[in-house]
Image: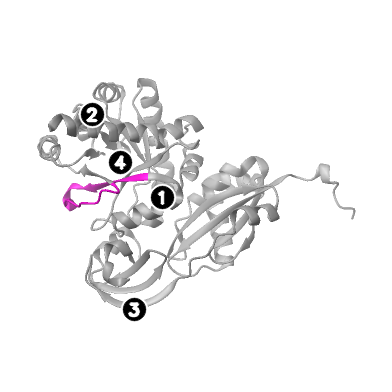
Amino acid sequence: MMPDYVDISVHAFPEGADTPKRLNLVARSLGFATIGVTTHSPYWSQFSDSSVISGIEIVAHSVRDLRKKIAFFSDTAPIISVHGGDERINRAACSDDRVDLLMHPERGKRGGLNQVTAKIAEKNGVALGLSFGYFWKTREIERSRALALQHQNVALCQKFGVPIVITSDAYSHFDLRAPRQLKALARFIPLEDKEATAALSSAPQNIIKRSTQKEKARV
Amino acid sequence: MKPLRPTLRDSFRYVAFTLSSEEPVRTRDLQAEIFKAAKSLFGDVGVSKLGIKVVMFDGTKGLVRCHYRHVPDVQATLATIGKIENNRVRATVVGTSGTIKAAIEKYLQIDERIRRIISSYVTVPVSGKAVRMRGKEIDIIPEDREIVDRAGVQFIGITIDDNERLI
């Protein structure tokens, strides 16, 4: 039986070009069970669409700003992900158990993760979000560099048991890819078929479960 | 020259795919882009081992031939194609088969939803001109190009459920 695949980090209208309904329609035709629409915090607006899971991707310029935003959004957004890159932001995101996902920590100067951050992430249940958009948005040096850093982070996360989540990081339906194609690309990271399947199904589903539990606890 | 015996020939697989694009794509351009993408991903030596060839393409769906051991490599290559001549595209692998006939029968009997050209002014969710419709999908050319420029596309994509007035 095919597992329920989830693409947990896509950006919908008004940040991206397609409405959540359109993205969901295309994602379902590609073989996904559902999608998670995470909006970058500058474009955050509440939308009521029960067919998709909504979330926030917090963009912060300092650790203090990040903590403030996590406190603010933890009551309103079901999924909290952090726009990684800066090493201090990555570390602060990993040390907060309200954060579900740290997206593309490799966007900084170095890999963005080290053994200390990976250990804290595992303790707090923060998953590593791999953005596969690099594969079709960039070429040559930029792509090789991003892949090398992703490779390094994946190895760290596998060693310390941090969950890995594969996402398309799409801004339109042209950025969505079928699960089987994402799995074919995951071989270059390198992730084995089983690991890639988990990164596309059980890992994002655990995040969704966790967010539902949190919501129940709040109520 | 005597042809190679079947046992000595390479074994191939046929990967069926569908292509969504903003503007119509020519077979020649698609073929060139597939080679470019494969070369960028695997290098000249890698491409020589793939045995890649576009067997057929009709504008929305097609078949790519490849060496039987390299099917995932071709799936990955098709996934890395995001643009053909400044035209955003998405190539989706539908299935793999051992013969052209089986591939077409199994995977390419997709009833093509005909793209209708429409022209109506909309304000929800964005003000602009709805230009085309395909099944439930509607594409809008917005007046304010900020969002489409950010996403690197031409249209704002909505569905019928987003704007019920368009039915």
Kindly identify which numbered label has been placed on residue A94.
2
Query: Residue A62 in the image: x percent, y percent?
Result: 14, 38
Which amino acid type corresponds to the residue marked 1 in the rendered image? Arg
- Callout 3–callout 4 Cβ contact below 8 Å: no
A137 left or right, relative to B71: left
Query: Residue A80 in the image: x percent, y percent?
Result: 21, 38
**Residue closest to the far right:** B2
Magenta span covers which residues? Answer: A34-52
Q: Is residue B149 something one can see in this rendering?
A: no
Residue A50 forms part of the magenta stretch: yes
**Mark toward the viewer: 2 or 4:** 2
Most foreground residue, B93 or A60: B93
| x 47%, y 61%: residue | B20
Could you say whether the residue bearing mark 1 is in a helix, strand or loop? helix
Q: Earlier in the sequence, mark 4 or mark 1?
A: 1
Which amino acid type corresponds to the residue marked 3 in the rendered image? Ser
Query: Residue B148 in the image: x percent, y percent?
Result: 30, 63
Q: Chain of mark 1?
A: A
Kindly identify which numbered label has been placed on residue A28.
1
Discs 1, 3: same chain? no
Residue identified by numbered label 4: A107
Which amino acid type corresponds to the residue marked 4 in the rendered image? Arg
Could you say whether the residue bearing mark 4 is in a helix, strand or loop? helix
Q: Is residue A112 above or below residue B28?
A: above
Which amino acid type corresponds to the residue marked 2 in the rendered image? Cys
